[in-house]
Amino acid sequence: MAQEQLYECAKILNLEDDVVEMLENPMQEVHVSVPVKMDDGTTKSFPGFRVLYNNALGPGKGGIRFHPEETVHTVKALAAWMTWKTALLDLPLGGGKGGIICNPKELSEGELERLSRSYIDRIWKFIGPDVDVPAPDVYTTPQIMAWMMDEYSKLCGKNQFGVLTGKPLNVGGSDGRGDATAMGGMYTIREAAKELGLDLAQAKIAIQGFGNAGSFAATLAERLFGATVVAVSDSKGGVYNPDGLNLQEVIKHKAETRSVVNAPNTETITNDQVLELDVDIIIAAALENAITKENAGNVKAKILAELANGPTTPEADEILYKNGIHVIPDFLCNAGGVTVSYFEMVQNMYMYYWTAEEVYERLDRKMTKAYHEVLYASKNHNVNMRMGAYAVAVTRVVDAMKLRGWV
């Protein structure tokens, strides 16, 4: 998917073949075996990766995933998207990504800490505040970032808070980081609604995916806009109430049962049905490939906001564009997280920390500017919003590569 999208963008921008060749694969790909002493006394090795995709604009930036079905191909694609995402937001950063094939739900806290530290022992020479800066991602947390930062600092012989972002506040974290991805998405939804003449106070919203980003998106949509969230879903299914969900009840129910399914005063629906509801806005906050050529034609919303990475396939993109659905592409919509991660790096560097209000104000400016640059590019090139975003981002990376004499 990532490569297909790049090739399509290359045609729009008339990029030279040698430039495309440099951009279609990562600059650096590290494979490691991560040994961990388990609680039962045995030692188990977990495969791990760290990919630096492109650093023409600055140090790599991108999360670390702990997932039983992680693959290096997924990590490479996500590292490519991080490259375009940081460029799109005009951040002085490149793109990277990391992962370990493991099931964190099966690990004790001690095993998780030893896994986190061992991973850093294996990759520490390939990361650093001015080299490549990891962050939390699927099944990794601020606590895991703190362990990793501490391990890196021990290896360097000095505190290096800036080696990772998404850390707890009292070890160099940033205010506003917890809901940054969802908050950034809200700013782009606000701008899209203005473009389409949609009154958000009257809008109905359905959210596929009720993890960190999805649950924050639901509560923020209500609080910031007065919108009505009528459906949410997680990996086990979805819930729907046409008059609006009681979000606090749904959140409480999920905390108690580990799923939103059967929350009070709701009707049970499937994940696919969430995407096909007659609502104004769909927020796709689950995993990759949720919207395909099979179901894209059933999407009725005016706006599709991609808070997840890669929720829409290229074939589905064409269908949505033809049907006049305004897609806010993933590496624009969910760029709030990496933008506040960049703010965290800046605060770490000069050891002065901003308030949450200052963080949100800066984030709003960045997201709003990026949205309108993408909107302009999509109209200027007569392409969909995703290709508009690619045009802006890839141009910035290519310009930097050319200025540096790489091509």
Image (cartoon, grey):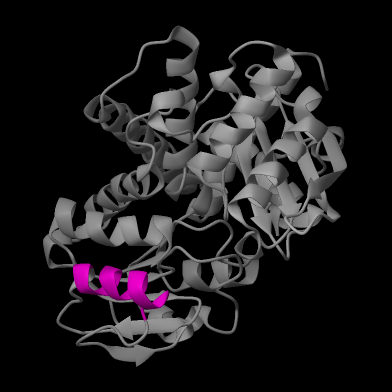
| Res. 190 in view | yes
Label count reads 0
320 relative to 96, above or below: below
Whole-percent x and y of residue 86? Answer: 55, 33
Q: Residue at x 17, y 77 (%)?
A: 244
- As for residue 258 lying within the magenta part, the answer is yes
Single out the residue that lies furthest toward the top. 350
Quick check: 165 left or right of 396?
left
Q: Nearer the viewer, residue 58 or 298?
A: 58
89 relative to 10, above or below: above
Q: Nearer the viewer, residue 221 or 64?
A: 64
Whole-percent x and y of residue 102? Answer: 73, 59
Quick check: 283 left or right of 402?
left
Q: Residue at x 63, y 33 (%)?
A: 148
Whole-percent x and y of residue 82? Answer: 61, 40
Q: Residue at x 73, y 65 (%)?
A: 69
- As for residue 58 lying within the magenta part, the answer is no
Quarter of the view holding residue 211: bottom left
| Res. 9 in view | no
Single out the residue that lies furthest toward the front. 41
Q: Residue at x 85, y 38 (%)?
A: 30
Quarter of the view holding residue 354: top left
Q: Nearer the viewer, residue 96 or 84?
A: 96
236 relative to 185, above or below: below
Quarter of the view holding residue 407: top right
Our reading of the magenta stretch's main secondary structure is helix
Whole-percent x and y of residue 387? Answer: 57, 50
The N terminus appears in which quarter of the rendering? bottom right
Magenta span of residues: 248-260
Quick check: 363 left or right of 398?
left
